[in-house]
């Protein structure tokens, strides 16, 4: 699904059984500051508010038997409908509905870029043994996993998605250059970083970084980024935007161009 570039505030509507959990991301650090400055909106709604019985029942036993409870479709459909009703104008059709699930597409930078191009999103936090299949087939546009492991709930996964996507909202991170040159975003792992003091416990900052020669500094950083990627994530080199100079340097380190990957 293709989305146009965002305009204005990025809106996250989170549907969860534990809305208070999202205070940690909306009140602190960079995302908290983005919320305070009106760059990002994070609204966490309690799915139980959309149940119809006096007990607020959001889950039930599985048809056919089996361990674990299943999230009921009625309150989730109602909660998503209410969230989308809050999305203005044409943005509603361009707002993805995300389900956090270990069965979903693995979150990577390509997917983050795709989501960041939307005006916002609705995120359903999975729980218990899972969700009623009709939620998958009738509601969601994206099913996303943050890794090949199982969490006790989808709240942490939702926070990871919010954090990763929010960084691409203009003004959230101080420097656009920082965002584009970060590890993975650039296609490579980041080069080593140093700050003052220049010497600490016998460990010194490389002289080139204090030389004032920006061309040499850029070359050193690029080489170190290539070295680190080759050492720790050689798979990234298969798709990284490499120049002929990059390839020659990697070949000098023993890289075979991924032919033996």
Image: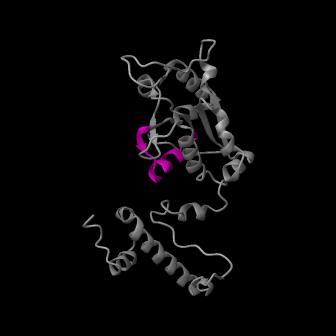
User: Residue at position x 58%, y 28% from top?
Assistant: 84
Give the residues in magenta: 102-120
Q: Residue at x 68, y 78 (%)?
A: 196
- In the image, residue 116 lies in the stretch drawn in magenta: yes
Residue 197: x %, y % from top left: 68, 80
Residue 103 included in the magenta stretch of the image: yes
Residue 241 seen in the current view: no
* 87 and 185: which is toward the camera: 185
Q: Residue furthest top?
A: 53
Asked if one can make out residue 143 in the rendered structure from this viewpoint, the answer is yes
Seen in the picture, residue 93 relative to 71 is either above or below; the reply is below
Does 198 appear above or below 227?
below
Q: Compared to 3, does 49 lie above or below? A: above
Q: How is the image coloured?
A: one colour
Report the quarter where the N terminus lies: top left
| Residue 206 in the figure: left or right of residue 103 | right
> Which residue is pictured at 43% across the width and 44% down the height?
149
The tally of labels here is 0
Q: Residue furthest right?
A: 36
Q: Is residue 49 above or below residue 162?
A: above
Horizontal and vertical percent position of residue 59: 52, 21
Residue 177 in the image: state x and y as whole percent: 59, 65
* Figure quadrant of the C terminus: bottom left
Question: What residue is shown at x 50% (from left), y 20% (from top)?
Answer: 72
Determine which quarter of the picture holds residue 181: bottom right
């Amino acid at each position: 699904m293709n989305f146009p570039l965002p305009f204005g505030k990025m809106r996250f509507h989170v549907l969860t059984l534990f809305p208070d959990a999202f205070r940690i991301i909306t009140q602190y650090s960079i995302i908290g500051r983005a919320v305070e400055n009106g760059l990002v909106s994070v609204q966490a709604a309690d799915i139980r508010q959309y149940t119809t019985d006096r007990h607020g029942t959001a889950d039930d036993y599985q048809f056919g038997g089996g361990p674990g409870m299943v999230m009921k479709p009625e309150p989730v459909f109602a909660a998503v409908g209410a969230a989308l009703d809050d999305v203005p104008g044409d943005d509603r059709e361009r707002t993805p509905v995300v389900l956090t699930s270990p069965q979903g597409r693995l979150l990577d930078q390509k997917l983050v870029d795709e989501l960041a191009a939307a005006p916002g999103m609705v995120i359903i936090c999975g729980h218990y043994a899972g969700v009623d299949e009709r939620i998958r087939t009738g509601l969601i546009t994206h099913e996303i996993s943050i890794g090949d492991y199982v969490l006790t709930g989808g709240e942490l996964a939702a926070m990871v998605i919010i954090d990763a996507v929010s960084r691409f909202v203009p003004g959230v991170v101080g420097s656009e250059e920082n965002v584009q040159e970060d590890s993975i975003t650039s296609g490579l792992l980041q080069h080593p970083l140093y700050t003052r003091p220049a010497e600490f416990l016998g460990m010194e900052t490389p002289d080139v970084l204090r030389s004032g020669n920006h061309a040499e500094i850029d070359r050193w950083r690029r080489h170190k980024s290539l070295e680190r990627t080759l050492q720790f994530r050689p798979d990234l080199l298969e798709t990284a935007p490499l120049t002929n100079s990059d390839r020659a340097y990697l070949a000098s380190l023993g890289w075979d161009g991924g032919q033996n990957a």
